[in-house]
Image (cartoon, rainbow, N blue to C red):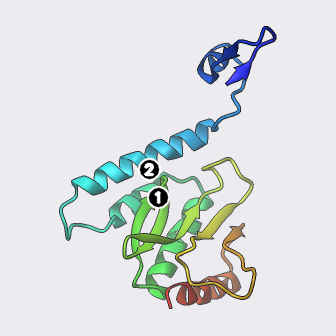
Amino acid sequence: MKREKNGAQKSSRSAAAAGKQSDGFSEDERAAMKERAQELKAAARRSPGSADGESDVLAKIAEMQEPDRAMAERLHALIKASAPALSPRTWYGMPAYARDGNVVCFFQSAQKFKSRYATLGFSDKAKLDEGPMWPTGFALKELTAEAEARIGALLKKAVS
């Protein structure tokens, strides 16, 4: 809440209505949270043993703009080949890959939060721990053969 000069509080909602920027979540962040709520509802409606979310992931990839769509398609194939134990699903509206219901890695397109690059991220469930510090996210501008080999090795380590 914002405080006006006379000491009264003004809600974020009324601040937004007045055309002022709120200090809260961005429009993109609110949209991602809504997508996550919808994902949870859809998962609760699915019967046990039903599709693991691959069709949802492929639909999210199809919505992406180029070059992120091509990168996400290639990553999807790479993840399925390098870490077949991971199940595709969506997570906050992004393609993600989980093991035992826990997201291990995800792809965030550059357009998702108006970033200058796409991101391949790993959660704390990924077994990438190495010493006192290690990376959990990688900026992606393009997928070269070298980048794919490095990602494949990270994926194998993440699920080891």
Residue located 49% across and 86% down the image: 159
- 63, above or below 49, in the image: above
The 10 Å Cα crowd at callout 2, few under 14, some 14 to 19, many 20 or more, is some
**Residue at the spot of label 1:** 91
Q: How many marks?
A: 2
Q: Is residue 126 left or right of residue 119?
A: left
Residue 139: x and y, percent?
71, 67
Most distant residue in the top direction: 6
Q: Is residue 131 left or right of residue 90?
A: right
Residue located 20% across and 71% down the image: 49
- 84, above or below 54, in the image: below
- 29, above or below 95, in the image: above
Q: What is the number of the mark on residue 129?
A: none
Residue 50: x and y, percent?
21, 67
Callout 2 touching callout 1 (CB < 8 Å): yes
Amino acid type, label 1: Trp
Residue located 56% across and 65% down the image: 107
The 10 Å Cα crowd at callout 1, few under 14, some 14 to 19, many 20 or more, is many
